[in-house]
Image (cartoon, rainbow, N blue to C red):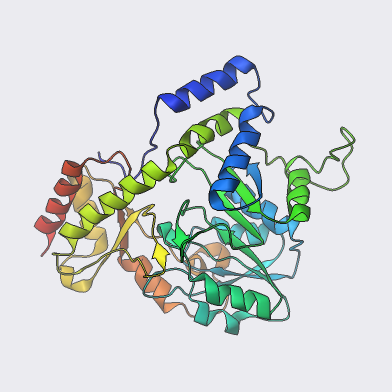
Amino acid sequence: MIPVAEPFLGEEELKNVIDAVKSGWISSKGKFISEFEEKFAKYCGCFHGIATSNGTAALHLALKALGIKKNDEVIVPTLTFIATANAVTYCGAKPVFVDPHPDYWCMDPEKIEEKITENTKAIIPVHLYGHPCDMDPIMEIVRDHDLYMVEDAAEAHGAEYKGKKVGSFGDISCFSFFANKIITTGEGGMCLTDNDEFADRMRILRDHGMNPNRKYWHDVVGFNYRMTNMQAALGVAQLGKIEQIIEIKRKNADLYDSSCSLINGITLPPEEKWAKNVCWMYSVLIEDDYGISRDDLMKKLEREGIDSRPLFYPIHTMPPYRNYDGDFPIAEVLSKKGMSLPSSAKLKKEEIEMICNYIIQHHA
C-alpha cells in the first residue's frame, strides 16, 4: 500500500533522540526543547515559541491565554479538522462557522462579517491542506472589530501569504507536528507569538499553572501540555530539513498536476497568485464528468494498493455541532467531491506516474 503520508526521517533524527536518551533528560526538560522553540519561531518570523504536547493542546492553550471563556463566540471555518472547533468548545465558548471560498477552500473573508456579534471575541483562520488564507481582509476585520486572531497553521508549515510565512500574522499562531505533518515530532505542537504577556501566560498554563518562581505553587488552573525533550530532538532535526521537504512536496504536486490536468472531471489543488502552497496533501476534486464518484474511485485505488483520504467532513454536519445555525453549501460540495492522494515527501516519481495512470484508467 502506498500511504497517503509518512514521515521523512533519517540519521539526524536518530542521532538527536539518542542524545536525548543518553542525557537522561527525556521528559519536559532538556536542551532540545528550547532549541526547537527558538529555531521554529525564528523560521516563522516570530519572537516566542511555546512547545506543546500536540496541536490541539496548542489551540486550547492559545484561546485560554487570550481569556476566551463561557458564552464567548469564536469564528472558525466549517471545512477543517474538528480540533479547531473542539478547542473553542473546551473553553465553554461557541464556535461560529464560516463557509470556505470556492477557489482556494479556506475561510471566505466575505462571509465573516455577517457572523460577528457582540459576543465575538476571536477568529481562527485555518490554512487548509497547505494553502494560506487570504489574510489581508481577515486582518482588517480583526482590527475593525477589535478581535483576537489565532492562526491555525497545523497543516501549513512554511506556507506563505504575499511572501510572508503563515504563523506570523496572528496574536497567537498554532502548529501541529503529528506524524503526517510537513515536519513531525510524532505528536507535538507549538504556539508562536510576538506578545511577551501571552507567551508568559502560555508557559505557565502549559505547566499546570505553576508559578515559575515558586515551585509547586499554582496561581491558576493549568494543564499538562508540555512537549518532551525526545519529541523536540526529532523536531530540531526535522526543522533542518523543512525546506527540502517543502521543495519535494511542491515538485511532486507539479508531477501530479502535469498528468491530472489532462483528465476530464478532476479539479487540481488551488494556489492563488498571492499564495505559496506547501502541498501538505495533494487534494483534488472529483467532478461529475469524471464518470464515477469520489468514493468509487477511492475504493478502486485501494484495490490497486493506493491509499487515499476524503476531504474533511464539514464540522457543522457532525453530531456535536449539528444544532448550530447556518447554510454552508461550498463546504458540503467540496467535502463530497474532495480526496487526498499520496502526498509523502518519500514518494518516487514512478509511483506518482503509476497513481495517475490508475486514475486515467478508472476514468469513465
Q: Where does residue 42 sit, x and y in percent of width and height?
A: 58, 47
Check the picture and name the quadrant holding the N terminus. top left
* Identity of the residue drawn at 46% across and 60% down: 160
User: Is 359 on the left-hand or right-hand side of 157?
Assistant: left
Residue at figure coordinates x 68%, y 31% from the top left: 28
In-front residue for pair 322/85: 85
Q: Is residue 118 above or below residue 216?
A: below
* Front one among 252 and 91: 252
Please state the horizontal and vertical placement of residue 277, each as a whole percent of the image. 38, 59
The percent coordinates of residue 113 (x first, y second) are: 59, 82
Q: Nearer the viewer, residue 77 or 260?
A: 260
Residue placed furthest toward the top = 22
Does residue 50 show up?
Answer: yes
Quadrant of the rendered structure where residue 332 is?
bottom left
Is 29 left or right of 218, judged from the image as shown? left
When asked about the image quadrant of residue 31, the answer is: top right
